[in-house]
Image (cartoon, rainbow, N blue to C red):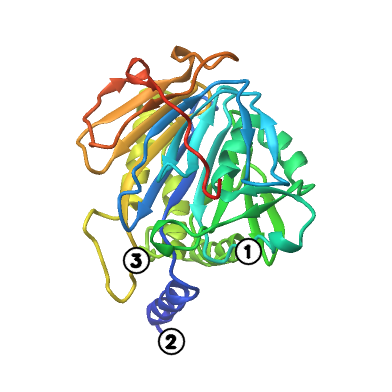
Amino acid sequence: MNKYPLRLFLMLFLGLAGPAAEACTRIVYETGDAAYIVGRTMDWTEDPGTDLWAFPRGMKRNGWAGSGAVTWTSKYGSVVSSFYNLATVDGVNDAGLAANVLYLVEADYGDPATSRKAKLSIGALAQYALDNYATVAEAVKALQREPFILVAPDLPGGRKAAGHLSLSDASGDSAIFEWISGKLVIHHGGQYRVMTNSPSYDQQLAIDTYWKTVGGVEFLPGTARASDRFARMSWNLAAAPKEKDPKLATATVFSLMRAISVPLGIADPKQPNIASTIWRTVSDTRAKRYYFESSYTPSIFWVDLDKLNLKAGGVPVKLDLKDRPIFMGEVSDKFAPAEPFKFIGQ
C-alpha cells in the first residue's frame, strides 16, 4: 500500500480533530551561546487594541472585584502587552521570566461560586506570574498548590475568555499550565518549547509524535489549525541553527514566527476562529529585552528593561499603540505615565 495516501488521511484526520480556536503560537529558541529567546504570535479576529505597559516593583494588586480576591505586591518589574486593556497576555519581567497566555477553548477553571479559594481574573494570570516569580521552577512550586480559582468573564464580542499559560526563563526551563475539567495540569521541563492552542497539550504532544516519524523534509501538515502549526513549528524549531550572534539569533526567532503566521485578511466563513496574526513578540530572557512587531506597521521596535524605572516607587508607564504608530529601535523613552488598566471582571 502506498504510504502517502495513508499520511494524507492521517493529516486530514488530525487537522480536523478537535474544535477550532483562536490561533497563537509560542516557542522557546536556544541560541548557540546557551541563551533562550521566546517568540510568540497573537492571532485574533480583530485588532484587540494592544498597548505596551511597564509596571514597577512594589505595585499593590487586586486580582478580582469584590470579596475573596487575590491580593499581592509585585516583587518584580515587567514589560507586557495588553489585550483590549483588560488582560496581560504576554511579557517579560526584570528577572528574565517570560509569560504568554494563548487561547484554549477546552479550558475549564471550575465553578468560582462553589469554591472557597481566592479569586483571580484570567486577565491577571500572566501578570500575577510576572509580578511574583523569578524562575519557572519557583512558579511551578507555588502554582501547583492551586492557591486561587480563575474567573473568566466573556471577552468583548461575547467570546469565551479561555486560555492556558506558558512560562520560560533564562535557564531554558519551561512550563505549560492548563486548567482542564476544573483541575490544573502542568507540563514542566525544558523540552516543552512549542505551544499552540487546541486540543489540550497532552494531545498536542501525541499528534507531534506522529509527525516526527514522518519527517519534515518529506511532509508536514500545512493548515492554520493549532495541531498543524504545532507539528510544523516543532520541526522548524528543531531544524533552525543555534546562532551565537545575538542579532542573528533574534532574527532567527522572528523568521520562525513569521513562517507560522497567518496573513492579514485571511478569513474562512466555515472556520471563523482561524484568524490573522495581529502582532508578534520576541523576549530575550538573558538580555531582558522585549521586541514587538505589529502586522499593521512595517517596523520592529524593542524595549530594554534596564532603561526603564522598574524599581519600587516607580510609576506605571504606557506605550500607546492605538493609532498604529511606526516606531523603530529602542523605545523606552517613548513610554508615558498612565493609570494601569483594570483586569477583566474588576
Q: Does label 2 or label 3 sit earlier along the sequence?
A: 2
Q: Taking 156 as reference, is 287 left or right?
A: right
Between residues 232 and 49, which one lies in front from this camera angle?
A: 49
Judged from the image, the secondary structure of the residue bearing numbered disc 2 is loop
C-beta proximity under 8 Å, tags 2 and 3: no
Judged from the image, the secondary structure of the residue bearing numbered disc 1 is loop
Residue 20: x and y in percent read: 43, 69
Q: Taking 136 as reference, is 207 left or right?
A: left
Three-letter residue code for mark 2 = Met
Above or below residue 96? Residue 213 is below
Picture quadrant where residue 339 is located: top left
Which tag is nearer the camera, tag 1 or tag 3?
Answer: 1
> Which residue is the site of mark 1?
108
Which tag is nearer the camera, tag 2 or tag 1?
Answer: 1
Which tag is nearer the camera, tag 2 or tag 3?
Answer: 3
> Which residue is the site of mark 2?
1
Instruction: Tell me the distance, in whole angstroms, between the alpha carbons under discs 2 and 3.
Output: 26 Å
Locate the C terminus by quadrant: top right
Q: Does label 1 or label 3 sit earlier along the sequence?
A: 1
Judged from the image, the secondary structure of the residue bearing numbered disc 3 is loop
Residue 141: x and y in percent read: 77, 40
> Which residue is the site of mark 3?
223
